[in-house]
């Protein structure tokens, strides 16, 4: 019998899209013959995923899992919105969020972790789900956040099931104060992050390239005013301050009242919880963001078919 090496398993996995455990089993069943292993997987319906791999998957669900001082968020994509309402798919995303929590949000470790009750890893279970449901799917991303003393709280927007929705947010608050009183504040801040979509926690954290791009636009606009150079400079700096108020979490107006700065809301909470409060960080996943979706022109497609 041929030795079943890790490289052989990897090659079979790349050729078929099947899970690691299924690939190992297939190779063992056919004494290490790669081509026979491919056929074995095909007969079991486990290589069907490879045929669907080229199809754009921009729908699906975002799942969050939070426990005490840590939390994780994942995005699992599918081709259609319909799959997001599938209970089997929802169960998978929820499970993966909890697995990501246990693996510090690391994508590789999460994909390779054992999926409960199946004998497969997460990637293998996803491949099995693709074959079952019949759509291309992918575990697109995962991330985690934690604090040493405080709370991490999750929120999902457009929720279809507990902790599953189109937008998933985690907010981490650091404080020695009353943790029970911290939770509702963190929940409100998570809802704010979902609605306001801040790009960074502080001004210092903001992407320098993003700021320079905004500065260039403001300079171009101000230059067209015909005003003196010193006035133009003040106009640009004023525009940058306004930009910070739009995209930096601590500078934004809190959505709950539309006027108080988030930084002040957090500072004021110290009296209520019995200790200083600091936002240690946040995570926000929006379903399908950054995925280039193929635009379908049905009329053009029909016309093209008629010409054949």
Image (cartoon, rainbow, N blue to C red):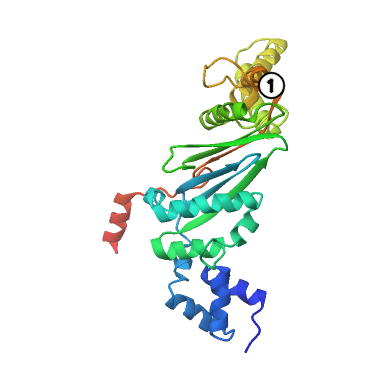
Q: Mark 1 points at which residue?
A: 274
Q: Mark 1: give few (<14), some (14-19) or many (20+) Cα within 10 Å.
A: some
Relative to residue 193, is residue 2 depicted above or below? below
Q: In which quarter of the image is residue 251?
A: top right
> Against 71, is 182 above or below?
above
Residue 171, x across and y down, in percent: 61, 34
Q: For the C terminus, which image quadrant? A: bottom left
Judged from this view, the residue extending furthest toward the left is 306
Give left or right: position of 236 versus 194.
Answer: right
Query: Element under label 1?
Result: loop
Vertical side of 135 occupied by 155: above or below: above
Q: Position of residue 274 (x, y in %)?
A: 69, 21
Q: In this view, does 41 lie to the left or right of 143?
A: left
Q: Is residue 79 left or right of residue 143?
A: left
Could one spot residue 134 in this view of the protein?
Answer: no
> Which of these two is toward me, 5 or 280?
280
* Residue plotted at (49% across, 42% down): 163
In x, y percent, where is residue 241?
Answer: 66, 18
The mark tally for this picture is: 1
* Residue in the image at 65% along x and 24% along y: 250
Of 12 and 234, nearer the camera is 12
The x, y position of residue 260, in whole percent, is: 59, 15
Q: Is residue 100 visible?
A: yes
Front-most of residues 305 and 58: 58
């Amino acid at each position: 019998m041929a030795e079943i090496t890790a490289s052989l398993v990897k090659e079979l996995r790349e050729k078929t899209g099947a899970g690691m455990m299924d690939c190992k089993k297939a190779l063992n069943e056919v004494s290490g013959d790669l081509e026979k292993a491919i056929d074995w997987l095909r007969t079991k319906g486990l290589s069907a995923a490879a045929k669907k791999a080229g199809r754009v998957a921009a729908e699906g669900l975002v799942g969050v899992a939070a426990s005490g001082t840590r939390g994780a968020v994942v995005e699992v994509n599918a081709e259609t919105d319909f799959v997001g309402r599938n209970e089997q798919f929802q169960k998978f995303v929820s499970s993966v969020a909890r697995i990501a929590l246990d693996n510090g949000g690391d994508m590789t470790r999460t994909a390779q972790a054992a999926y409960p009750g199946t004998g497969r890893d997460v990637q293998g279970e996803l491949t099995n789900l693709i074959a079952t449901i019949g759509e291309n799917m992918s575990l697109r991303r995962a991330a985690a956040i934690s604090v040493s003393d405080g709370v991490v709280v999750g929120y999902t927007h457009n929720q279809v099931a507990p902790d599953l929705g189109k937008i998933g947010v985690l907010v981490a608050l650091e404080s020695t104060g009353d943790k029970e009183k911290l939770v509702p504040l963190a929940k409100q801040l998570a809802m704010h992050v979902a609605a306001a979509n801040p790009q960074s926690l502080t001004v210092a954290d903001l992407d320098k390239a993003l700021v320079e791009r905004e500065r260039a636009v403001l300079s171009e606009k101000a230059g067209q005013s015909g005003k003196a150079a010193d006035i133009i400079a003040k106009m640009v700096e004023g525009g940058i301050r306004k930009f910070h108020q739009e995209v930096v979490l601590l500078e934004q107006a809190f959505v709950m009242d539309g006027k108080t700065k988030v930084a002040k809301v957090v500072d004021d909470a110290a009296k209520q919880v019995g200790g200083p409060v600091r936002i240690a960080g946040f995570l926000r996943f929006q379903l399908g963001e950054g995925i280039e979706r193929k635009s379908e022109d049905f009329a053009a497609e029909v016309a093209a078919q008629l010409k054949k």
